Amino acid sequence: MVKSNNRHPFKIFSGNANRPLAEAIAAALGKELGDVSVSRFSDGEICVTTNESVRGCDTFIVQSTSGPVNDHLMELLVMIDAFKRASAGRITAVIPYFGYARQDRKARARDPISAKLVADLLTTAGAHRVLTMDLHADQIQGFFNIPLDHLQAAPEFANYFRERVNAVGVENFVVVSPDAGSVPRARKLSQKLGDVPIAIVDKRRPRPNVSEVMNIIGEVEGKHCLLLDDIADTAGTLCHAAAALMEKGGAASVTAATTHGVLSGKALENIEKSPLTEFVIMDTINIPEEKRIPKLKILTAANVFAEAMERIHDDLSVSALFG
């Protein structure tokens, strides 16, 4: 960690969405979480009680807007407002998983652009900056009128899979994009793994949360494939792609890596039944113990968030983390 030159106190608080990650970030920084209580009134309204001063402090609120999305989003907004009214010096919303990110454009007439609405809500509440990881669409950064720092999970995935690549050889390992939109993400990981080959799964979506594989673009026969995506909701896309890579493409094995494990509906059942040998996710969303099936491997984002937060506090470059 870089040495702090900022004279303003540095405080970290957590909502209820992902306290284990917040605690891990605080531990990486050698700090304790701030004393705040986030509870409910009897009618369900959010109640925030801050039990320590934040006046003039560089204040970081760690809160993923994961399910229940609306509750956790409202918690974050009320916490920001509470700290603003308590004269916090600077408020950074640390949102490891940014909910509503898939509603980033008008796909049909009269659709809302909910990601833009959430950006406006955060700004109006009083956030001075947002820190997040692997947005579903890069253009969401432009929805904000305040600074946004966009972290990447690719270095963490590269560290985890590098030994596997070295074991089978670069020429026998393929990073596979599950759709055309994820190709830039796959290319970044490919470069970090020594320029391994890339393949693309061509799919269509007849309806939301349902995907059908049409073609495989690239050479995967006899190779070890790593499917890479940003979000696993029902995991249907990745599981169908894995089946196609094995059955149509003749792959030797298929592993999946995704930053945000939403894992809703029949996701765990889909993963268990799929030919995937391993399903690797980051801890941007808290996964309860009952959902931690044998195929699931969870990597921590705590260190990269801790480093980014310290750099923000010291007015240093965050992009240097990924140089």
Image (cartoon, helix red, strand yellow):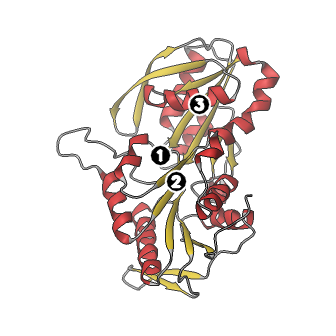
Corner quadrant of residue 194: top right
> In whole angstroms, how far apart are the C-alphas of marks 3 and 1?
15 Å
Residue lying at 50% horizontally and 27% vertically, measured from the top left: 183
**Residue 18's x, y, as percent?**
58, 64
Q: In which quarter of the image is residue 146?
A: bottom left
Q: Is mark 1 on a helix, strand or loop?
A: loop
Task: Decide: few, some or many residues near mark 1? Use Cα within 10 Å; few <14, some 14-19, many ≥20.
Answer: many
Q: Position of residue 59 (x, y in %)?
A: 55, 72
Residue shown at 57% from the left, 26% from the top: 187
Q: Name the residue under label 3.
A: 188
| Residue under label 2 | 132
Q: Is residue 242 visible?
A: no
Amino acid on which the number 1 mark rests in the picture: Leu
Disc 2 to disc 1, how far (Cα)? 7 Å
- Labels 2 and 1 touching (C-beta < 8 A): yes
Crowding near pointer 3: few (<14 within 10 Å), some, many (20+)? some
With respect to residue 274, does 23 lie above or below? below
- Residue type of the residue flagged with mark 3: Lys
Inspect the image, locate mark 2, and give the three-letter code of the amino acid beneath it. Answer: Thr
Q: How many marks?
A: 3
Structural distance between the alpha carbons of marks 2 and 3 = 18 Å
Q: Whole-percent x and y of residue 262?
A: 51, 50
Please give left or right for residue 161 compared with residue 132 in the image.
Answer: right
Secondary-structure class at tag 3: helix
Confirm whether residue 176 shows in the render: yes
Q: What element carries label 2?
A: strand
N-terminal of the pair, mark 3 or mark 1, is 1
Sequence-first tag of 2 and 3 = 2
Q: Badge 2, how many Cα within 10 Å: few under 14, some, many 20+?
A: many
Residue bearing mark 1: 135
Report the quarter where the N terminus lies: bottom right
**Looking at the image, residue 55 lies above or below residue 95:** below
